[in-house]
Image (cartoon, coloured by chain):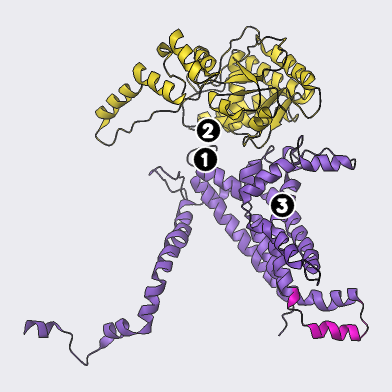
Chain colours: A yellow, B purple
Amino acid sequence: MAWMVAVVATLTMTVSFVDRAALSVLAVEVIKDLGMSKQQYGWAFPIDGSEDTTWHYDAMLWEAGGDILNADNTQAAFNSDAGVQALTALQQMAVTDKSVFLDQQNTGKIDTLFNSGKIGMHVTGPWALSGYPDINYGVQIMPEFPGGSHATIAGPDMWVMFDNNGHGEAAWQFMQWLTAAEQVKADAMESGHLPIRNSVVTPSFLKAFDQKFPGEGLFAQNLTNVTKARPVITSYDQISRIMAEAVVKVMLGQGDPKSSLDDAANQVNQVLAGG
Amino acid sequence: MAAVAARPPRGAPGFARRALTSDHLAGWLFVLPAVFLVALFSIFPIIWGFILSLQKASLISPNRPFVGIDNYTHIASDPVARQAATNAVIYTCLFVPTSIIIALFLAIALNQKIRLIRFYRLAVFIPVAVSTIATGVMFMWVFDANFGLANWALGGVGLGPFGWFDSPSGAMPSLVIMTVWGWLGFDAIIYLAALQGVPHELVEAAAVDGASRWTIFRNVTLPLLGPATLLLVVWSTISAVQLFDEVFFITRGGPLGHTNVPVFYIYRLAFTSQYGFSAAGYAAALAYVLFVVILILTLVQFWMGNRVVHYSS
């Protein structure tokens, strides 16, 4: 599922989504547009310390040109300059500007507040669009850092086959059929799932898809910005927890980006070394 | 001929026949389903949990090497466990006295002969019957730092705004307020029952002797509420140390671990892989230590309670 920023469309969009600095400015602008009441926020971020916190950050890390781990998954890499840049942007918005709504519970509050016009923008996926009947909004791809990319994060569900039941060959064939372009296309048009094959995303598909599921066309197009995936290793959950702790700490104003990420990287390296 | 021989010989009852015809058998058969369920869901997990606590294990992998008491010794050097223990102490010290003292005054109020008293009693008890999730959703919004009713109301009298669940220092007190609200009805009903059990003639005799209302309350009513108080202290302490639902649903142990309580930490160790795939054994060890702590706490409370509580005949 590609993530993008959903924006309340009634705002005058004077800033285009070219870079992250613009988002930061925009978050403040949005508050002004909404009336600069302290009851409204430009942007929102889940800080419950879950994987949700981490992958909101992951996208920004990639947009700045960074990586979670090194190429062979043996060392933490998120405490690079890119990682610090991404977290500093979050710190700026959360601590200095106070333009971002920090959701400690992360049980749907952001969606509710977005739907009632209390939050100007937030990062979400196509599944959430049906939850905003009360507002006019638009969808835009993720902003980039200068010199970075519009990288987004995709959270595909894994298709897992067991090899211990004697039907491995049949399972493999089924999987090939299931993930073939024709089935992917049919599933997308039927259910609104984003297609998992770029070859499916043709102009004619996009038109039909967006017509049936308004707003989702751009999500499907955005799949070209899915250039990186989270490391598929057994200790990922531990890494995610440690990274989330660092992000939350900084966004609550209790740590600085560089040292928090370095500290987290040390912990992650210990986990990676231990197994 | 063969059929006759197969019949049990008459007049030779023996053990088997006595067992088959006695009341005991019927009794055992009646309780068998319950015994089976208790064994399956209580006794078996207790034993398995102990074995697990001696292993480096996940709940799904068959690979479970025994590590002796390593899991237990690890607890002492685990900063998260220490933080969870501290949080449990803070929560218990806030929750138990607060809920019991408020419940006592509430019970006294509910013991008056006034109009609509049944309605008030019902109103006080309703939170106990409401599911924790529903309570959680409500408090999540009431205590929302930006859009919540609590900050709006307090702002009206010039207080706040408070961060409630969102602030590292406010999350635990917010949990206390929410759980006290949820438990108050239960405590108040226990006290109400105890208050109604206070013999009227004692109160009357004291009044005739010229005792003031406060003196009667202090020297007659309060001592007679001793057993109820002891029950509530023990009960509340056990549930406070085992706090989980509200933390799981609302704060998830945050912000920054300030509401990470023991049972929630045990849950995360055993049923998520946030602390690695093989932490279930360590979680079981923590659960056993928690059990021993609760047992000791309860014994101490009963021991101290029995020195000050008077049971009326």
Residues drawn in magenta: B195-212
* Position of residue A191 measured from the top left corner of the image (x, y, whole percent): 44, 26
* Position of residue A124 measured from the top left corner of the image (x, y, whole percent): 59, 24
Task: Describe residue B30's horizontal placement relative to residue A2 as left or right.
Answer: left
Choose top left, top right, bottom left or bottom right for residue B108. bottom right
The residue positioned 17% from the left and 88% from the top of the image is B9
Q: B23 above or below B44? A: below
Which residue is tagged 2? A237
Q: Residues within 10 Å of mark 2 (few under 14, many from 20)?
A: some
Subunit of label 3: B
Residue, far top: A147
Q: Does B283 lie within the magenta span?
A: no
How far separated are the C-alphas under marks 3 and 2?
29 Å
Which residue is tagged 3? B91
Q: Residues within 10 Å of mark 3 (few under 14, many from 20)?
A: many
Task: Describe residue A53's horizontal placement relative to residue A35 as left or right.
Answer: left
- Circle 3: residue type: Tyr
**Quadrant location of the C terminus of chain B?**
bottom right
Which residue is tagged 1? B272
**Quadrant location of the N terminus of chain B?**
bottom left
